[in-house]
Structure formats: structure tokens, C-alpha cells
Amino acid sequence: MAAPAPNPAAGPVLKLAEPLPLDSGRSLADVEVAYETYGTLNAERSNAILICHALTGDQHVASPHPITGKPGWWIRMVGPGLPIDTDRFFVICANVIGSCMGSSGPASAAEDGKAYAMRFPVITIRDMVRAQVALVDALGIETLHAVVGGSMGGMQVLSWAANFGERLNAALVIASTARHSAQNIAFHEVGRQAIMADPAWNGGDYYADDVGDPRKVGPESGLAVARMAAHITYLSEQGLTEKFGRRLQDRDAKTFGFDADFQVESYLRYQGLAFTDRFDANSYLYITRAMDYFDLAEEHGGKLADAFAGTKARFCLVSFDTDWLYPTSESRTIAHALNASGLPVSFVELSAPYGHDSFLLDVPELDQVVKGFLQ
Amino acid sequence: MAAPAPNPAAGPVLKLAEPLPLDSGRSLADVEVAYETYGTLNAERSNAILICHALTGDQHVASPHPITGKPGWWIRMVGPGLPIDTDRFFVICANVIGSCMGSSGPASAAEDGKAYAMRFPVITIRDMVRAQVALVDALGIETLHAVVGGSMGGMQVLSWAANFGERLNAALVIASTARHSAQNIAFHEVGRQAIMADPAWNGGDYYADDVGDPRKVGPESGLAVARMAAHITYLSEQGLTEKFGRRLQDRDAKTFGFDADFQVESYLRYQGLAFTDRFDANSYLYITRAMDYFDLAEEHGGKLADAFAGTKARFCLVSFDTDWLYPTSESRTIAHALNASGLPVSFVELSAPYGHDSFLLDVPELDQVVKGFLQ
């Protein structure tokens, strides 16, 4: 078992004093939660909004990524005067546990000083939320103005409402689902198998002593393939056709070979390779597993409406018409459950050509919905 | 470069006397075309139906697979008294070139006696059809009663009509498309990258001297991942939910590990592994490439209707409502082009829960359509 990498968090890191209890029955000691904040907490401590990130996201919502140097992943949404207005709100985002941007994950040091690798416990969406609750406690915040998230972030929002429902006044769930479908699980399993099939995965034990970062080592080929497969599910057929169609990449004719003749091939290869620069393959295994395990109704006796018995939060659900990963029908199921619980819910399907990725992209109607809901 | 494997064809093999000209500008010498026939050619040689198989299919339409021992892939459709009635019709099916069931492909011997591997020329759907034309010539058949195929088989049917339009009276195109979309290409590229990322692929040179069959060697892990990803696209979300949902595999509770907890995971893993027993990874590369290159309009000056100027065949197009790989809109595009060409065409969208795979499965309405059209 190789040595863990130094903590790559660029911002503050909370060390939990107590072991974190997990859904598996195990507990995780010495948990670290890396996070970012934007704006100022008011004297009443009533203006905090927690943003929950997606599978490969991180806490750098509105500040540059420390590895890639790219702008934060939601700068169109979070900032002064923006829909999630940091002039008014104290915005928090924490790296989920299991990830690789500073919160405890498989690349972190276990008690023996070596990287957990596959000794890291399998976690759930609710476990991620438990770590966030500890962070919110540490920040001295009793009640969040809102919890907001898209995709896996939306699952966390639902889990907050279901398990810590008295701690939030509003829940904004974008392009998400209350449970992973068979097709969702199937695509994740392809990605996991691609990683595990790579000999460089080595049973998860690929963290080198002489490498200062858990990324850029390990099963890069397998992780790239996993990312390519997943990336297709984030885009719509329509979006791919509009963006690439059958256009060729820097050539006038097909080469009758196996180079990336088509732009869409070149794009996917780039997306796959670039991903390996910033993400840990074992984290990809653990986080996809957490998503596949997510079934909010199952956690609450099999009836989704029962999951929301402990909250008085108001809800907003947003879906996108071209999102085939978590289609509108998934949001509708949640809306029906909230209606059955007698909770206030607004639900809108927006039209955007970008598929699941729409929640991250230029969809002005989404800005309006978010701004209006958070008033 | 290792030695090629013995020819795995269980039936007759035609050796072409002349090199086969290819769309790439190259030509292929010593081409072999492995095929099966069912029924009897009548005295007028007017009752022949050519069936074209799909990506991973073969010539064993209605007879057992020589490796797996499983029944032919279309026994519900082809046989005495069945919709493609072998009491009336002489049914031919040839393994496509590029494949691995006896027709020339990357596992075949090149002139130096060693396997072609990646020295095999990149082929197109039209090249596959050229080899079939040579077979039909050799069988002494001037005009086919019909050419029939689903998925990639349907592409071959369209290519027959477009390029050898005077040689067929009827064309039956099931669950297919006149060109591969960006999303289609993207999924294939994931599969190719999974194969090429496997170190056992070894630049395509994995055919061992001491192994009697091109399968069960080479990049099995990569090929299995490729098959898993493709397999998801053959099924519908609805079908996956009905067949597997979130049911667990032989256990009462999640294991909080990375075994195949869910039935859908276990099923996909099995599909991936089983595929490596019967298919050559290099063939998978070449055939997916041929499909990605397919764009019938592009071959004919950019206008699909112009592709059909040389035929008087009548057409039947069938799509399935849950097929998201080649959705109904693709068949509609073909129907419009045929209408513009003034050709007789019937077009039906059938309802079936199985997604793209519907053309292979128990859909009684398809039987009726096929039977009626081939009268």
C-alpha cells in the first residue's frame, strides 16, 4: 500500500473531531472536509446557501480550479449580482467525501499512514451529506437558507431534506433523480469496469510514493474510457449533432484508418484524457457507487413521500427536455411525492439543447428560476 | 506479426478469383466469403433472398453457431413456414468481410502467411456489399427477390439498392439508418478506445501461433468493456427497468463493495465476457469503423434521394418506438428520400419494449410485416 498524496485542497479544510458514522455500518475516522465559501455570513447566520457539487465537481464553484486553472464550474450562477448572489448570501460548497479535491477519499491517508485505496469504505449520498452537516455545524449555522445542487448535487439536496429536513428552508434540485435507474447503473458499471480492466489500476493500489499528486498516476487509460462513455450521457443526441454532426477533424476526407477522423471522436478523446489530469480513478469508483446506491424511497420504507415527512422546506425542481440521463419523468416523480407530502413545490421543465449538462451551461431561463426561488 | 487462425467457418466458403476493389482505393486479394444457405434455388433462380447481418452477427441465421452452439440468430424469422419461408425461398447469408466467422478479416492470412491484424484495409458498408455481390454472382443469381437486414444489415440493404439497384426487386430495412449520427460514432469510439487501451491489444498484433482460434486471445478486457457500452445502446431504458430495475443479484442487501450487487451489473458483465468467446477485437474495430463511415447521401452527391436513382425496387422500412440507437426519425428520413425518388415504400413504426434489439426478439407484428412484404 503506497503513501497517500498531499492534500490538494486550495482552501480551508475542516477536520472532524468525531468519526463519521456511515450507512454501511462502518465509521470513518479523521475525516477532512475541504470547502470554499463566498460572501459573508450575516449576524443572524440566516443567509447561508449550501451548494452541492456533481460527480466530478468540486468545491471551487466560483474560484479557479487549483489544478487546471480553469474558472469555477458555476461562475455564471454564483457571484455578486448573479442568481446566487454573493452580495446577499453566504455560499458554501464542500468537496464530497470519497472525492479527491481535499476531502477524505481513497487517496487520503488511512491510520497506517498509507493511502486507503480500496480500503476506503463504500459511502452513500447520505454519508456525503453527513459530512456537510458537520461542516455547517462547525460554521455555526443552524438553518440553511437553501441547499442547491444539480445532478448528484440534486441527490444530496434531496438527502438533506429527507434526513436533516429541519436544517434547511428551501431545496433546489436541478436535473436530478430520487433514485438511479437500471440504465444509470449500467453506464456507471461500464465506467468502473473500464477502470478496473486497466492493469495500471492494480487493485486500486497505484498511489506512488514519489508522485506528489494522486492524479496523473494509475489507470489513466481506463479512467479516460470511463469518462468518454459518461460524457456521451451528459450530452443530447441533438446537441452532439448540432455541435459536431459528421464533420471531420482538420482534414478534407476520411483517412480510412483509426485516427480521430470525426470531430466528435477528437472531442471525446480530449475529454477523456483531460479528465485524468484532475481526477482520481478510485474516487470515480466510489462516487459512482454512491450514486448507484441512491434510492431515497428505499431509505424511507419504500414510499418516496415518506422521505419528506421531517421537513417544512419549500422545493423547486428543474429538469431539461433533452436530458436523457435524468429525464423530466424523474423530477415529476419527486414532484408527485412532495405534493403527496403537502410541501410547497414548483416544478419546471426547461428547454435547452445541451442534454444533462444544461444545468452547467448558458440557459438564461435557469438563471431566472434560481434567482426567483432564492429570493 | 503472428500466424493467422484457421478459418472458423462451419459452412461453405467462396474464394474470389479477382481482388476486391475497396472504397479506400486499395483492393483486397484472395478474399474469402463464408456463407450459409437455406431452402432451394428454383429453376428460374428467382426466389433468392439475401439476409445481411448486424455488427456482431454472422451467416448462421437459422443454424447453430459453430462456437457457442446456440441456435441461429433469427430462427424465429427464417425457416419452413416462417415469415422468411425456406419452403418457398432460397435464403443466403454471408459473413461480412472484416468479420471473424470465415470471411476475410483482420484475423485472416495476408500474402505473407501471417495475420493481417491492423494491416487489413479499412472497409466500408459498400465494400461488404461488393463481396456479397460476388457471392450472388457465383451462385448464378442475377436478381434477388429481396435483400433483408436489421441494424448494420439494413445499411447493407440500402447500399445494395443504391449501388446495385438492378440486382434486387425488394429491400427490407429494419431498425436502421442511412448514416451514422454523431452519437452513434461517439459510442463506437468509446468501444474502440476501450479495446486499444487494453495492453493485450498490442497494436492489433495478438494472434498467437499456438492458439487455434482468433477469439479467446487478445484484449478480452477491452473488448468486454466495449461490448458492455454497446449493449446498453441496444436496450431501452424502459426495457432495462422492466427486466432488472434496481433488483439485487442473489443477495438480500447491498454489500457496500464493488461486486455486481445489481442484476443489471451482473448481466452486463456476463454479456461482455461471453462476447469475447466468439468475437475478434480487431474485427470489432474494423466493422464499427465501417458503420461510422456510412453516409449514403454523402456517397451520392449529398442528396439521399439521388442514391436511389438506379433502382426500381420496392421498399419496406421498419422502426421501433423504443429504439434510441436508430430512432424512427432515421427511418422517416429514408422514407422521405424514397418518396422523392418516386419509389414504392411502406414504412411502419412498431411498438416494442426492447429498444434496438427488438428486431431480433419476439415482436409478432414484425413477423407479420416481413411475411406480408416478401409475398
Image (spheres, coloured by chain):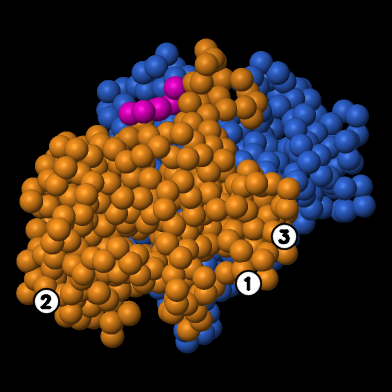
Chain colours: A blue, B orange
C-alpha distance separating marks 2 and 3: 50 Å
Instruction: Determine if residue A166 is in view.
Output: no
What span is colored magenta in the figure?
B242-247
- For the residue labelled by badge 3, is the local secondary structure a helix, a strand or a loop? loop
Residue named by callout 2: B341
C-alpha distance separating marks 2 and 1: 44 Å
Q: Nearer the viewer, mark 2 or mark 3?
A: 3
* Residues packed near mark 1 inside 10 Å, few (<14), some (14 to 19) or many (20 plus): few
Q: Is residue A78 left or right of residue B70?
A: right
Q: Is residue B175 left or right of residue A152?
A: left
Residue under mark 3: which chain is it in? B
Spot occupied by residue A333 in the image (x, y as percentages of width and height): 31, 32
Residue under mark 2: which chain is it in? B
Q: Nearer the viewer, residue A259 or B146?
A: B146
C-alpha distance separating marks 3 and 1: 13 Å
Q: Is residue A296 above or below residue B27?
A: above
- For the residue labelled by badge 2, is the local secondary structure a helix, a strand or a loop? loop
